[in-house]
Structures are given as structure tokens and as C-alpha cells.
Image (spheres, rainbow, N blue to C red):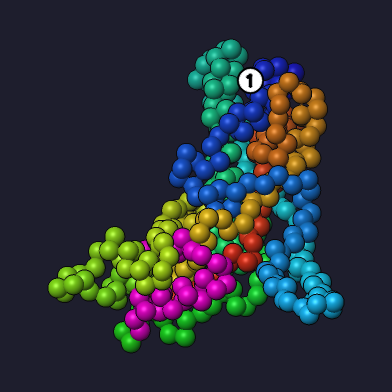
Amino acid sequence: MSTFGWIQTLDNLSAAALTVLAQTRSPNDSGRLLWDGFMMPADVDSISLEDITTLDFRPASGRRMWNQRGRRMPLRTPDRRKIEIEPIEFNFRVDEKEMQKLMERFLGNQQLIQQQIGASIPTRVEKLADANYRQLELDVFEAWATGQVTVSNPENGETYVVPYDFAAERNDTAGTAWDDPGVNAYKELIAWLNDATALVGPLAGVALRLAARSAILEDAPSLSGGAEMSLANLEDRISQDTGQPFRFFLMEGTVEVPTDGGVTYASQKIWSDAAIIAAVPFDKRIGKTAFAPIGRAMSIAQQVPEAKIDVRRNSVFMFEENGGRELDVECQLNAFPIPDENRIATMDTGIS
């Protein structure tokens, strides 16, 4: 038997068992991630998606004279965009050196070595599954804020951009930064909210970073008697000035992202551009997150039907490399954000 062949003999370490374990992980990290609150999961049948933009066309019919024909409804079709999902994947490796140290630690006792590896692999798989959802968090909010998703090559760090090609009116840019001394950020917000409402419909508020919220609060009108505006008072005042409910959705969460091929990591905000604010529709729905089947998971699901594997969620695969000296464990997720263009309205405030 190869160095890692015994793993396949343990029920709790099979690919099916580890996949089931990965699929029990919370998709939002028990509330720390926000992606599924704005772009809910939606199962699709293929990685090739011909996303059909919701048509924003609401015609009125019109009246007619008696005995005459009424107005004919014009045929309008939505724009189409071709999107192909690329996998999200994280992996770890149990290598020859790790096994060597375990052999030394347990004096070659195979039972103790197997217990140690058997306990560590599921814990590491859970971390892989969590990491996949953190990447999805980054993708969802980049798609919403910027109208694109950046895909990187894990081997060399090279990146390319997948654009959604939203209409220019959906992504506005301030002529002068809102934190410029000559600009009143509060008044700019109120004016932009009126424009955003025309594009999106009734709003629940705006998604933004702390810097933008602070600039708006600093320029907000004073309360009666000259008292400074508090954050709670600010949301109420904006609601009064816009005639609709309002709240700030603060986007200050962080995840760790690679700065090179994947060895060095640094903290990054989920809403990476502090200058951009985005309108939040009344129902807080920006679009959907498409979950496509994973081909390799289909094979596992067929082999172990009693496991009831969801082939569209995190799936785990293992294989030996380098003559059996190393064991690779991968966790794959085929998911991609699909914002609804009719629910997109952003403003680049220029705030630094």
C-alpha cells in the first residue's frame, strides 16, 4: 500500500465524507460574511451562463376611440451577456516531510500516525470550505461596486478582469471629491439618492465604507439649537429628506488574500474601494449568486448516493502525487455573482 493508501480505507476520510463535511460549513461564516444577504444563492445547470438582464420596460397601454384598434405593444428584448464560471478552489498538501516527523514522533506506530492525520485532515478541509466562501464574498462585492470581477492566476499572480458591461449611467463619478472643502457631502448624497431611486426604485439605504459615511456625517446639517448630528439622527434626517426609509450598510469586513503566488497573505476589505457607495434596493436584493454543478462531484455522488452530496456546493477531492510521497486535498466551488443591472446604482465619491 502507498504512503497514503490507508486513508481511502477510513470512512470519515473518504472524498464523499469530506465533501459532506465541507457542505455543512456555514456559507456566510455564521454571519461574518454578507454576500448571501445581497445576492442569494441560485442553482444553475451549467458553468456557461447566458445571463439575461431584466428588462426595465414598463409601458402604459393608452386609450382608443370606439371601433378602432388599440396601441400595439412594441417588442423589446433584454441585452444578453455570456458568462462562464471559473472554479473557486483551495487546497493543502500532506507531504513526505510531515509524515517523516510523525514517524519520528510516534516511533513508527502506524495506528497513532493515522489517528493524528485522521484528526487533522477534516479540520483542514473545513478551512478550505470557509476560504472558498470568503473568495465568493470578495467577488460579490467587487461585482456590485465596480461592475466587474478580477480573476487571478494562483501560480504567478497575474490577473484579468471579467466585466459585466453595465450601462454608463449605472456607475456615476463625482466631478469633485465629496471630502473636498468646497463640497457638501450631505447635499451630494441627497441629490444622488434621488437619481439612484429613479434608476433602482425605492431604496433601503446605501452600502459604503466608513470614510464615506464620516464625510457625510461631518457635512450634515446641525440639529436644532446647534447640536451636532449623531449617526442615528443622520439616518433619520436622510429618511426625512428623501421621503423613504434609510440606513447605512457599513462594509468594513476583511479577509486575507494572497499577495503573490499564495504564500504571503495580507488583509483586504471586502468593499475594496472606499470611494464608492452603492444604492441598496428596498428588498436588499442586488442579484443572485449562481452555483453550477462540479463535474468531479457528480462522480462521487453517483458512487455514494447515500451521502446525498449536493454537486453544486463545496466538494472535496484527494489524490497522491510524486510517487505517493504527497497527498493533495482540494476543495472546489463553481459559483459566480450575477448582479441585476436594474438594481445597480453606484457613485465614485472620490473620497480617499
Residue occupying image coordinates x 47% and y 86%: 175
Task: Kindly state the secondary structure of the residue where label 1 is placed.
Answer: helix
Q: Residue furthest front?
A: 66
- Is 55 placed left or right of 199 in the picture? right
Q: Main secondary structure of the magenta part?
A: helix
- Res 207 seen here: no
Magenta residue check for 230: no
Percent position of residue 52, x then y: 75, 61
Q: Amino acid at mark 1?
A: Asn
The magenta segment: 183-210
State the image quarter where residue 5 is shown. top right
State which quarter of the image contains the N terminus.
top right
Q: Nearer the viewer, residue 243 or 228?
A: 243
Q: Nearer the viewer, residue 238 or 309?
A: 238
| Residue appearing at x 49%, y 64% in the figure | 203
Q: Quadrant of residue 139?
A: bottom right
Residue ID for mark 1:
12
Could you tell me residue 103's position as x and y percent?
Answer: 56, 20
Point 60% across, 49% down: residue? 40
Label 1 crowding class (10 Å Cα cut-off): few <14, some 14-19, many 20+?
some
Q: Could you say which is closer to the camera, residue 2 or residue 139?
A: 139
